[in-house]
Image (cartoon, rainbow, N blue to C red):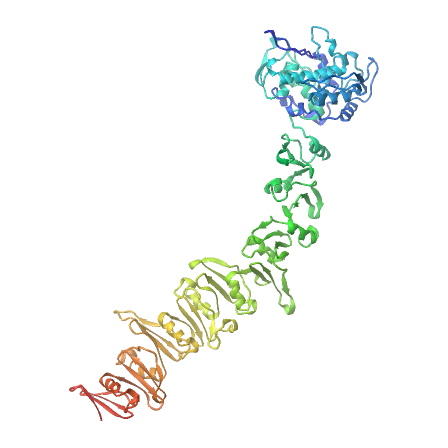
Amino acid sequence: MTRTVRFGSGARRFAAVITVLAALIALMQVTTSSQQAQALSGSDFQDGYIISDANFFDSDSMTADQVQSFLNSKVSYCSAANGMPCLKNYSQWSAGLSGDSYCSGMPSGTMSAAQIIAQVGLSCGISPKVLLVMLQKEQALVTSTAPYKYSYTSAMGMGCPDTAPCDSQYEGFLYQVYYGARQLKLYLKNPSWYAYQLGWNSILYNPSSSCGTKRVYIRNDATRLLYIYTPYTPNQAALNDLYGSGDSCSAYGNRNFWVFYNNWFGNPTGFTVLGDMGARYQAIGGESGTIGSPIAEEVCDWTAGNVNCYQNFQLGAISWTPSTGAWETYGMIRGRWQALNFEHGVLGYPIGAPTCGTKNSGCYQNFQNGAISWTPSTGAWETYGSIRSYWAAQLYEEGGLGYPVGAVTTSSAGSSQQFQGGTVGTSSAGTFEVLGDMGARYQAIGGASSSLGAPIAEEVCSWTAGNVNCFQNFQNGAISWTPSTGAWETYGGIRYRWEDLGFESGALGYPIGPQICGTKDGGCYQNFQNGAISWTSSTGAWETYGSIRSYWAAQRYEEGTLGYPTGGVTTASSSTAKNASSSLSNSSQEFQGGTVVTSSAGTFRVLGDMNERWLAIGGQSGTLGSPIAEEVCNWTAGNVNCYQNFQNGAISWTPSTGAWETYGAIRTRWQATDFERGVLGYPTGAPVCGTKNGGCYQNFQNGAISWTSSTGAWETYGAIRSYWLAHGYEAGSLGYPTGPVTTTSTGATQKFQGGTLTWTKSTNSVKVG
């Protein structure tokens, strides 16, 4: 039995001690064959933390029916040998008790022991579990098959000092339980009245002070109340033999309290699971269930109408709201929910338990706004919104899509998610699946967050005549696939140019790789079966293929002197590459640094001013036709000049004269005069036709060459040309020259249609002969 006293008037008086014999009898009456008892060790006892406040003050931890069931389970039969019923059969009439600041009172009427224990717990705010344990440790009432009357009159040891009879005002089971619980509340509300406080305390091992004391750091109120009620801590001998006796200095009250609670209700320093969460916890097996033991108290938010609670356990948690109920989350599904920021994320709260046994040993759990699905091979991934609705319409994991294998990716364009059988994308255009290799490629580039955006239609495939290919359109482009090329996206300027070329039906065929950016000047390119398309913001997107592309490659692509293409491939017969033949037998293409031309003579470039002149006179379709060699330049001794030969002539260039073409009879005559090394020098302008009698002429640095079909092509220069000029060129009486200039030691002569002009060196004069 235990007596409870206050410290006052400087005199220290201790609460009564449970005798060694009573303690051992009580322990012997507790079943010790349970797994909890077998696992219990004295090394687990925490002298400063015997029971948590949450467990101690959990006043509704057991209903009267639950207490009754508990009592029934502890006694299989009762004996009337001592004239009193077992506790499970005990009942008592009460006139009722008035409440005060410690307990709220008791109703009148006849109540069973179970009803008294449960009602006192509610009235005084003490756990019925604690009251049951104290009844056992004081008088072994819970497990006694033949209790004495004294066992009831002093059931809690309330008002029963060791040295005097029990106080009659507390006599009887109802009063013992009620006022014993009230005494605990009195300790709680008036801590300064008692010697034991939170923090460090010196606590006796035994009523005999010669047994010494132990420094104990009391961590919480519940432990402090137990020490005030029974003011001794077990010594090592008592802890070494939890179900037996220690030594002469052992005391057992608080040890036995800890042992009983552990064996009956689990770890007293554990955490309670209340209300709907407690009911769900028990429904899934409690500590032996999927989430193990609680590791913290519940956490609730009751502010601003946001009513919700959760509690963490060893292997998961239980979450609760009034509208969703209480449901556990654990394992990989909980891990994924955590990654989504729990209830604050897109899914909200769970609305059901995890369900396992789906295809491929899968599990899923439903949440307010979606679900999380898991298999050992795919992991755990959420589905929600339009994507989940689409998946549902495809029979979830039983359909062709299988399980999700990645998270939902979102952008301003829409959302997408990869499944085992493909990818599902959604936007304002609708929800569509992207299957097979195209789905894998779509997800690899970021799904809806990629340059393509969300799909806007289902795939389109052609399986006729052995032509197996598919494509699918997206907001900003498309993915194309064939078995030999794979699946590749096209978008932006490169895709627009590919479209101009007739997509895969055009010169380039299908894409064979992704768009690659980061080349010179912020450029991008993409390879196709028969060539590539290159793009920069300044040049636009243009294709290269065939001999022209091979030539460009040999010049190190855009890194070489040609730079990027600035236009499409053209042919001598057409100015649109869209209709061009892939053979490139007579084609050209402009680049930043010049033009590349291919013909039967080969592939050559035309650069700089000569290129501009060649293009100005029609390029391949012009008078000169295609180049038949690279340009030839002389940069030595300050003599800077270049020329390039074409099918029908050439272009010559110097810095002072510019670039001009020569061709036909005029070029042949210029050649006869030894080109620029001869008397005429370089051309200074283009051939001009339409003069008298259908004639043509071309000016050079030192003269000109004139031609008609009847006279041929002949040069004029010097004093003879000046005289001819003064007399009206071919429009005058002299007409066209009909032969070359003939020079002698004394001068020169030249025949014209209207006569011969003779120049005399000595007189520097010209006359008609």
Residue 692: x and y in percent read 34, 88
Foreground residue among 228 and 49: 228
Q: In this rendering, does residue 487 appear at all? A: no
Q: Is residue 95 left or right of residue 508?
A: right
Foreground residue among 578 and 426: 426
Q: Which residue is drawn at 75% across and 26% down?
A: 63
Relative to 599, is 36 above or below?
Answer: above
Q: In this rendering, does residue 344 appear at all? A: yes
Residue 725: x and y in percent read 26, 85
Relative to 245, is 337 above or below?
Answer: below
Relative to 157, is 510 above or below?
Answer: below
Name the quadrant containing residue 237.
top right
Q: Is residue 37 left or right of residue 690?
A: right
Q: Residue furthest left?
A: 762
Relative to 469, is 402 above or below?
Answer: above
Which quarter shows the C terminus?
Answer: bottom left
Name the quadrant containing residue 716.
bottom left
Name the quadrant containing residue 520.
bottom left
Q: How many labels does the image show?
A: 0
Residue 754: x and y in percent read 28, 93
Which quarter shows the N terminus?
Answer: top right
Residue 717: x and y in percent read 25, 83
